[in-house]
Amino acid sequence: MNYRRLGKTGLMVSEIGFGAEWMGRHTAEECSAVLSRAEELGVNILDCWMSNPEVRSSLGQALAGRRERWYIQGHIGSTWQDGQYVRTREVDKCSAAFEDLLARLGTDCIDLGMIHFVDSESDWDAAMNGSFLDYVKGLKASGRIRHIGMSTHNPAMAKRAAESGVVEMILFSVNPAFDMHPATDDLDAYFDWENYQADLGGIDPQRAELYKLCERLDVGITVMKPYAGGRLFDENRSPFGVALTPVQCIHYCLTRPAVASVLAGYDTPEHVEQAAAYETASGEEKDYASVLARAPKHTFGQGECTYCGHCKPCPANIDIAMVNKYYDLASMQPQVPATVRAHYQALGHRADECVGCRACESRCPFGVPIAERMVKTAELFQE
């Protein structure tokens, strides 16, 4: 495993990281198996944005006796309220969630305290101009967090963070598809199909500027969404009409300026091995450019769910990301596979319980028509 300096934090993090989001659907034993394999392969950075107590406890059990071998990227503002994830800047709720994170992970300090999910001007104002930021700075002053970071999908907000003098590193969504998209401060326009480039004329200038700015200011980047929710692995779902490999996606990310670690998501130890194969891959295996140059399609379609979970909370307690994932898996087949149907039926709340309020759509950073997909999912899985 190779290690890179994460900007001004000075932390030497593994090029391949562990985005632990998918551990929420696994047992503590399965979680431990994935984390152990990652550690064996030299992975040393873990992101936990999830507020669900069960996944936090599973990660804590897996980390027991090995905390010192890991850098933890923990999020401030991701809370668990009435059985659901809620993003908030209310200090009392953020404080309770942060103390819960420390307790469940079995640690007294988080290495990278992330200001959670800032994607718009209103998000920025709420997070960076008031008591919430004072709370985050207090955590650093007291040693509860070592460094202040921020997570965002919006390059305009990432740029503000890099220039703030407060944020030391950024968790940002990077992959070949997202980088083709022109940036804007208006999220509705940012994910509007008509604003996409007509061809692969190169990386969007504002995103390219962001990477160079971060490198110049020594603000390190860790990467989320490197596989675009797995779509880049399937030519039928890829926005380019060609399939890429995990190694190619990771290489794309690691060739962006300021990027230190790619935090891929894993379901199994084998998934970790597929990512870690980057370290021994040949130049030909890493080559994404020639694949994209031959791609028959050149734009990233609107409304593609990457299962990030930011659509929560749902008034009907639907796990929207998982419903969308099962819909995508099922709709790719002539008939719904029995295993997919069984997993879908095992969900505590399913698509037919959607009330159509569309509140989730206002929180989705990728413009997914969620209510419409809930209707389609209910029809697809109808007995």
Image (spheres, rainbow, N blue to C red):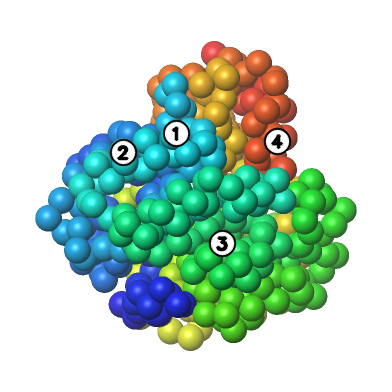
Q: Amino acid at mark 1?
A: Lys
Residue found 59% across the figure and 84% down from its top: 216
The label shown at residue 100 is: 2
Alpha-carbon distance for marks 3 and 1?
A: 25 Å
Residue 184 visible in rendering: yes
Identity of the residue drawn at 49% across and 69% down? 168
Image quadrant containing the N terminus: bottom left
Mark 2 vs mark 1: in front: 1
Q: In which quadrant will I find the C terminus?
A: top right
Q: Is residue 277 above or below residue 88?
A: below
Could you classify mark 3 by the number of other residues whose Cα lies within 10 Å: few (under 14), some (14-19), or many (20 or more)?
A: many
Report the residue at 79% width, 51% height from top.
Answer: 186
Q: Which residue is mark 1?
A: 93
Earlier-in-chain disc, 2 versus 4: 2
> Badges 2 and 4: C-beta atoms under 8 Å apart?
no
Q: Secondary structure at mark 3?
A: strand
Instruction: Specify the amino acid type for callout 3.
Output: Phe
Which is more toward the observer, 176 or 263? 263
Q: Is residue 250 visible?
A: no
Marks 3, 2: nearer the viewer: 2
The crowd level at tag 1 (other Cα within 10 Å; few <14, some 14-19, many 20+) is some
Residue 153 percent across, percent down from the top left: 62, 56
Front position in the image: 201 or 365: 365
> Do callouts 2 and 1 mark residues in contact (Cβ within 8 Å)?
no
The quarter of the picture where residue 343 lies is top left
Real-space Cα distance between discs 4 and 3? 20 Å
Q: Amino acid at mark 2?
A: Asp
Which residue bears the numbered disc 3? 172
- Say which label, 3 or 1, has the lower sequence index: 1
- The residue tagged 4 is 362
SS type, badge 1:
helix
- Could you tell me how far apart the alpha carbons at marks 4 and 1 are, in whole angstroms? 22 Å
